[in-house]
Image (cartoon, helix red, strand yellow):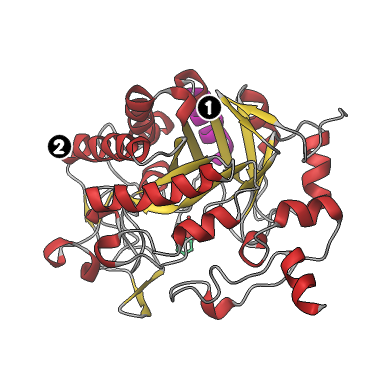
Amino acid sequence: MSDQNLFTPYTLGTLTLSNRIVLAPLTRNRAGAGFVPSQFAATYYSQRASAGLLISEATQISQQGQGYQDTPGIYTQAQIEGWREVTTAVHAKGGKIFLQLWHVGRVSHVDLQENGAAPVAPSAVRAATKVFVNNRFEDVSEPRALNINELPGIVADFRQAAANAVAAGFDGVEIHGANGYLLDQFLKDSANVRTDTYGGSIENRARLLLEVTAAVVDEIGRDRTGVRLSPVSPANGVSSSDPQAQFDYVVDQLAALGVVYLHVVEGATGGPRDVAPFDFGALRRRFKDTYIANNGYDLDLATSQVAADQADLIAFGRPFIGNPDLVERLRSGAPLSAFNPATLYGGGSAGYIDYPTLAESNASAS
Ligand code: 8OZ
């Protein structure tokens, strides 16, 4: 045991975080015209700036990378300018913020793609999942397998998006390699049945993630590059036939590339932590730099895992929605507020920037 606790500063690369609590990426589907971040996003993120680190909602690197309506992008000048308002507001409150870079792959719908094109995937294997589009949940569209000649273009899109994120004022980026989206589809052999150098072996299935990571590190530097993984999550219909050996390898390679953090969804995303046997401690030990743990953490588990050196930082997702001052509530043992599920995905300011801090609710009650 050590004397580390959640509320002490932490050095992440060149950044000093004020505590070890992280805002996990949360999709909120409120982008405006041109997939520019919501006019309320600067307020939303800055309300939560007391977290040691904020990770933005998943943000598509291209139109092809979009899978749900009204999610923001980072591939146009207007999007960069919209995000700049967010980073400026967060920095004004002393916060730090990374942008999560996202390509959904097969988890998309023709109505979101250019000219109604099919979504792209490692293989023409449709996911048994739905996306929110046309104001309702619809089955994903039949995907087409990417030609090997198209993969450098996807790597280039991630690279450009990372450069755009820095131009927008972000402190770094998180590559979304989790939850059954494109990079995870390549990793998981339920979705990847390719017979070329991007399919088959553990090494081949990791190739696209590692090429993307190397390109982003080259573009913006290792201290500004994190990666999120979900080794055993069944999110969006993916599974690996040998997750421990696979993710031991992936993590060793990410360590060799020198990324500043590994962010791991432990268990089923938003569900049980014990969905499948897996030694997350092995990943933590193999990766010498910062390990961010996520999924179903409460104060007790977060405190004990940090004290036992099983994680450096803990990412909280849903508890941050209704508690913009989550850090202060955890520190003081105050009760947590629930959030309204009806305003989780989509809408305007209601259920987004109107959750009060504890001090605000006490003031209005008296
Ligand atoms: C919830 C709804 C839509 C997308 C993820 C980006 O699971 C998401 C997501 C979550 O990583």
36 or 115, which lies in front? 36
The N terminus lies in quadrant: top right
Choose the circle earlier in sequence order: 1 or 2.
Answer: 2
The label on residue 149 is: 2
Q: Specify whether 131 is left or right of 335.
A: left
Instruction: Name the residue located 65 percent from the left edge and 67 percent from the top edge.
Output: 322
1 or 344, which lies in front? 344
Main secondary-structure element of the magenta-colored stretch: helix
Q: Are marks 1 and 2 in contact (CB under 8 Å)?
A: no
In the image, residue 91 lies in the stretch drawn in magenta: no
Number of residues whose C-alpha sits closer than 10 Å to that of mark 1, classed few (under 14), some (14–19) or many (20 or more): many
The vertical placement of 59 against 133, above or below, is above
**Range of residues picked out in magenta:** 243-253
Residue to which mark 1 is pinned: 260
The C terminus lies in quadrant: bottom right
Residue 128 visible somewhere in the drawing: yes
Give x and y (percent) for residue 147: 17, 43
Marks 1/2: CA–CA distance? 30 Å
Task: Name the residue type under label 2.
Answer: Asn
Instruction: Name the residue located 83 percent from the left edge and 42 percent from the top edge.
Output: 304
Residue 191 visible somewhere in the drawing: no
142 or 101, which lies in front? 101
Number of residues whose C-alpha sits closer than 10 Å to that of mark 2, classed few (under 14), some (14–19) or many (20 or more): few
The vertical placement of 75 against 321, above or below, is above
Q: Residue furthest left?
A: 115
Give x and y (percent) for residue 4: 81, 31
